[in-house]
Amino acid sequence: MISIDGNCDRPGESDSDLPLDSHPQRKNQPSGLTWTPLECFAEIKNPWLILKGERWRDDQQREFDYWRVEKADSLIVLPQQDDRLLLPHPIFRPGVGRATWDFPGGRLKNLARMEDTLVAILNRELALPADSISKILLLNPGGWSVNSSFSNQKLYGYWVSVDPNYAINPKVIGAQFQVPQQLPDLLSILDCLQCRSLLREWQQRNELVDGHS
């Protein structure tokens, strides 16, 4: 169901609206670029997202109308067992009109329950129970903005080590890649920019660790 509200709250009145220069989890951010919210002239809601039309005044007193989306954050998980990264079977993506390879992932509705969401995602996509997970690592503390000009959505990524003694049902595994030898092959099939970014972050962390070992 979609609802349309022409009398929505002014931007800046909800907890999700922050000045452009405010981000408590980031360091060395640019300062002095705060815009002033003037009005929200339209709002379209559905269970997945809220589309808002807003008017802003910039630091040079110019006014701009922007449309932006408020939606739940994303959580993507890189599961590894022994020396293999695991992918579920491809699924159809309406946005591109075809099936794609992706790491397990889903919506993150509650930051305070991030690890619970992680477990639910792995159970849904790879049939992994909570006790099969031996180690987890948050790859990007604070999250990354997905499209800051249009959306408040952020991406969070975890690397997960699966107990090597746990027998994963082979029917749920779509593909597996030895690391680091087959990383180029894995990158060659990943279209998702978010998946690729987190894989590169994980790769860089491993290279830094290996370089200081």
Image (tube, rainbow, N blue to C red):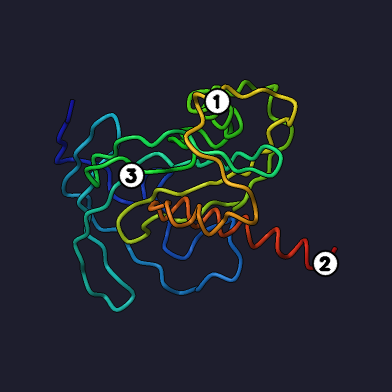
Compared to residue 131, the image places residue 64 above or below, namely: below
| Residue type marked 1 | Pro
Looking at marks 3 and 1 on the same chain, the residue that comes earlier in the sequence is marked by 3
User: How far separated are the C-alphas under marks 3 and 2?
Assistant: 41 Å
Looking at marks 1 and 2 on the same chain, the residue that comes earlier in the sequence is marked by 1
- Picture coordinates of residue 60 (x, y %)? 29, 79
Would residue 162 be found to the left or right of residue 94 on screen?
A: right
Secondary structure, mark 2, is loop
Tag shown at residue 170: 1
Would residue 210 be found to the left or right of residue 115 on screen?
A: right
- Picture coordinates of residue 10 (x, y %)? 28, 48
Q: Toward which corner of the image does residue 55 lie, by quadrant?
A: bottom left
| Residue type marked 3 | Glu
Q: Residues within 10 Å of mark 1 (few under 14, many from 20)?
A: few
- Kindly identify which residue carries mark 2: 212
Closer-to-camera residue (211/6): 211
Image quarter in which the C terminus is found: bottom right
The total of numbered circles placed on residues is: 3
Looking at marks 3 and 2 on the same chain, the residue that comes earlier in the sequence is marked by 3
Secondary structure, mark 1, is helix
Tag shown at residue 70: 3
- Picture coordinates of residue 69 (x, y %)? 29, 47
Q: Nearer the viewer, mark 1 or mark 2?
A: 1
Whether label 1 touches label 2, CB < 8 Å: no
Residue visible at 54% across and 53% down in the picture:
198
Secondary structure, mark 3, is strand
| Residue type marked 2 | His
Closer-to-camera residue (85/194): 85
